[in-house]
Image (tube, rainbow, N blue to C red):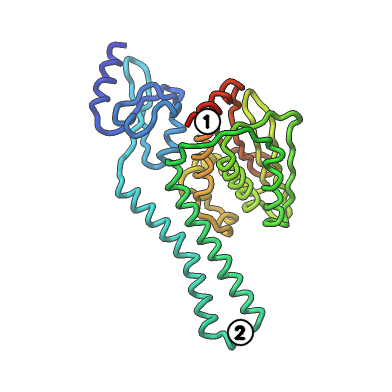
Amino acid sequence: MQNEDFYKSILNLVSLPLCLCDKDGFVIFANLAFKDKIDISKINSLQEIETLFSSKCEVKEIKISQNTYKIVTIEENENQVHQDFVSTVSHELRTPLTSIRGFADTMLLSSDKLSQDQRQKFLTIIRNQADRLTRLVENLLEVSNISKKDKLIFKEIDFANFIAPIITIFERKYPLCDFEILISPNLPALWVDSDALEQIITNLIDNAAKYSHENSTITIKANYVNDFIEIKIFDEAEKIPVNQLEKIFNKFSRIDNPLTRKVEGSGLGLFITKALTQKLNGRVFAQNYEKGNIFTLELPLSSVEKQLETKISGEAQ
């Protein structure tokens, strides 16, 4: 143990963010540089670190006092991160702008040669691409504002009443999909910020419907499991590769397969979903099943005492 303490004191002097994990991948020590970079109380395992830092995370095995540990270092290259961000955003913005400019120019230069059907088609494309551009800008603004959303307003929400109008919107948006709602009898009320929950649920259902095959059924189940409200959304899409199930929640992450290449997206929806879920003290994750993928949202229940405490503190402000 004395040797371990000695090595840990040395690691604290290293400016590179690093931590130690045991043989099972659980974090047992993080140096000061690592703690300055991330709240260590919210990180439990190597898997979570790799999800957060993706390719910037390097893992090696070392031996200390006959025990094998995994030492995790995080490369800091802010310029590269900035360049990647600018490159991705530029590409995502350029695509709809190119379509809008191209079809608008065609209508301006050849409007007298176009049929009514052609004009209607081109205007529809311009409108759809403008909507896509709007969604992208809104997502980018949402990403920039997530860290500022500390003042959440928690209140009781009946999930059945909450989900109904959301499903009505999706039934109109995806007329070729069926939406099935299965809510456990006597499901306790949720204690959440309604705006955050609406965005989370909307992102998850939209993701499921967008990538599912035609004439699919999107199933939403809500149950009470081990002091959590568990909301599961089943799609009927191509299965996400197992090694990508965690990474799809990273910023700008998109699975590269024939189906996703046909579907427009910025790769920000699930990143925003995870960030908002964490602010609600919940958890969101994905897994495969026989017909496609399941996205599970877990939200903790607050005790009556906690709810009263939150209400009182809110009224006092």
**Element on which disc 1 rests:** helix
Circle nearer the N terminus (2, 1): 2
User: What residue is shown with label 1?
Assistant: 315
Residue at x 37%, y 55% (from the top left corner)? 86
Give the percent coordinates (x, y) of residue 245: 54, 40
Give the percent coordinates (x, y) of residue 43: 43, 29
Rounded to the nearest angstrom, the CA distance separating label 2 from label 1 is: 62 Å
Left or right, 269 with reference to 75: right
Q: Nearer the viewer, residue 284 or 63?
A: 284
Q: Residues within 10 Å of mark 2 (few under 14, many from 20)?
A: few
Give the percent coordinates (x, y) of residue 222: 69, 35
Q: Residues within 10 Å of mark 1 (few under 14, many from 20)?
A: few
Residue at x 48%, y 65% (from the top left corner)? 95
Determine the residue located farthest toward the right in the rendered image. 185
User: What residue is shown with label 2?
Assistant: 114
**Element on which disc 2 rests:** loop
Determine the residue located farthest toward the top in the rendered image. 2
Give the percent coordinates (x, y) of residue 211: 62, 52
Q: Quadrant of the N terminus?
A: top left
The three-letter code of the residue at mark 2 reads Leu
* Vertical placement of residue 256 versus 130, above or below: above
